[in-house]
Image (cartoon, rainbow, N blue to C red):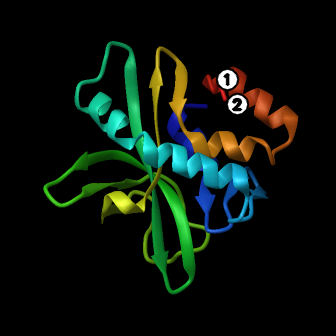
Amino acid sequence: MKLPALLALLLLTATANAQIGDRVVRVPNENKDMAAAIAKAQGSLDAFLALYAKPPAGAEQFRLKVKVTDDNGSEHFWVIPFKQTGTGFTGSIANDPDIVESVENSDEITFKRTDISDWGYVQNGKQKGSFTVCAMFKSMPAKVVKQYREQHGFEC
């Protein structure tokens, strides 16, 4: 399975969840691990953006996780690829919505820094960042977590 397919399986919603095939793993908003993961991602966003601007050898698949809200609720999506603009960011939604109806997979969206809840990239086959995915691992079956760590290089 390639990384975009993996990322489509691992998404964060307002009641944070990871979708594994037909199974959805939900993490409550109040979950301390998820809150800490989002805070860590937001606190390290400047360093990530600097790395993105001048990627080292072996770094690829840069992505942001972005909160989208409409009348149906809030959901967080991986945005791949993305770029900075003078007033924020633009990028393409990389997974299917489960809650919101205002966006679809592959839609181009514009968003602000405050909408970013996570970031990630691959460095020499190892996942870097993706703090919310690592937080979700705590609510997922050990067998599935092991598979993602082995096959996709997660080192949480």
Residue 14 percent across, percent down from the top left: 62, 68
Q: Label 2, secondary structure: give it.
A: helix
Q: CA distance from mark 2 to mark 1?
A: 5 Å
Q: Give the tally of numbered discs.
A: 2
Task: Decide which of 119, 45 is in the foreground and name it.
Answer: 45
Image quadrant occupied by the C terminus: top right
On screen, residue 143 above or below 119 = above
Residue situated furthest bottom in the rendering: 71
Q: Which x, y percent locates residue 81?
A: 33, 44
Instruction: Name the mark on residue 125.
Output: none
Amino acid tagged 2: Tyr
Q: As displayed, is residue 41 above or below residue 76?
A: above
Q: Which residue is mark 1?
A: 151
Write the residue at 68% across / 65% down.
Answer: 29
- Whole-percent x, y for residue 26 in the image: 76, 60
Q: Nearer the viewer, residue 132 or 91?
A: 132
Q: In what element is the residue under mark 1?
A: helix
Q: Amino acid at mark 1?
A: Gln
Quarter of the figure that contains the N terminus = top right
Describe residue 97's horizontal placement relative to residue 108 as left or right.
Answer: right
Q: Which mark is residue 148?
A: 2
Please tell me which residue is depicted at 31% across the width and 62% down the height of the picture. Answer: 112
Q: Are marks 2 and 1 in contact (CB under 8 Å)?
A: yes
At horizontal 62% and vertical 49% (from top left) the residue drawn is 36
Q: Position of residue 140 (x, y in %)?
A: 81, 45
